[in-house]
Image (spheres, rainbow, N blue to C red):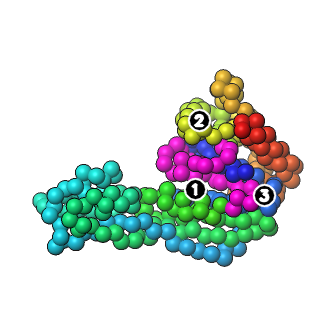
Amino acid sequence: MIISVASGKGGTGKTTVAVNLALSLGDVQLLDCDVEEPNCHIFIKPAFHEKKAVFIPVPEVYKDKCTACGVCQEVCEFNAITVVNKEVLIFPELCHGCGSCTFFCPEKAIYEKDKEIGIVESGARNGIKFVHGKLNIGMMMSPPVIREVKKHIDKKIDVIIDAPPGTSCPLITAIKDTDFVILVTEPTPFGLNDLTLAVEVVRKLDIPSGVIINRSDLGDSRIDKYCEKENIPVLMRIPFDRRIAEAYSRGEAIIESLPEYRSKFRRLYEETEKIKSSTT
């Protein structure tokens, strides 16, 4: 089973859940797809054995062939190419590497050149296969790096994906084609607002899901009322505990500092498996 751990906003404890779920199960694969700021490796501490650069194709222009007809500008959905005073200007930072300008150029005056935007590293520790991506500083296109990370998915074992926060393209790229999504939230107005957005995305993709309420003894009951109204199962509650915060600050997983949580995370997996089975 491929389980994605996501959240509508950052700072809810998404990485904490992904890491501890992986460590509690063992013999799993953990993919850190939060490529703009990956931090699962801080807790897993893997020995990396492979590193691969990630590229996207960026257009270049043969000036002697270009007639400045403007077709490339018309077909570019991302405003990465424009024509000014009969000169084609390219903005690589906006380019998604879709290839439309190259394909539709009537003069075949556009070719593509690979541009490195990040890296993917693979490693392992204590039976956990680990892969993460790192988007280069200044780059904006995280989905291509996320897709490269997901190419390493080993379907022979359970896979845990730490997805990027938010509800935009990076999240969708990470959770697409997974079997279950765990949505981590917190009992605050911001937590509820962003949870509702994340739930809409997951439902559009038709993926079974459930909620974990982190720092569950703070705030109010609005998250519980929302989940009850929307028939979303609350899979687990993690209290606001100083010991958890201290372990996190030391780069330690919860189950390493508080072993009683190992069985709780195993039950979490069993619950996701049960829900997944009931929806197929």
Task: Specify whether residue 210 is in view.
Answer: yes
How crowded pointer 2 is (Cα within 10 Å; few <14, some 14-19, many 20+) is rated as few
Residue shown at the point (45%, 68%) measured from the top left: 55
Image quadrant assignment for residue 202: top right
Q: Which mark is residue 203?
A: 2
Instruction: Check residue 228 for magenta coloring.
Output: no
Q: Position of residue 148 (x, y in %)?
A: 55, 63
Magenta stretch bounds: 154-181
Task: Specify whether residue 238 is in view.
Answer: no
How crowded pointer 3 is (Cα within 10 Å; few <14, some 14-19, many 20+) is rated as many
Name the residue furthest left: 85
**Which residue is denoted by mark 1 in the rendering?**
34
Residue 219 relative to residue 117: left or right: right
What is the C-alpha distance between the residues marked 1 and 2?
Answer: 21 Å
Q: Quick check: 122 above or below 267? A: below
Three-letter amino acid code at disc 3?
Answer: Leu
Query: Which quarter shows the C terminus?
Result: top right
Q: Quick check: 92 above or below 62? A: above
Residue shown at the point (73%, 51%) measured from the top left: 1
How crowded pointer 1 is (Cα within 10 Å; few <14, some 14-19, many 20+) is rated as many
Which of 95 and 6 lies nearest the eye of the viewer? 95
Q: Which mark is residue 23?
A: 3
Three-letter amino acid code at disc 2?
Answer: Arg
For label 2, the SS is helix
Dot 2 or dot 3: first in sequence order is 3
For label 1, the SS is loop
Q: Quick check: 200 above or below 136? A: above
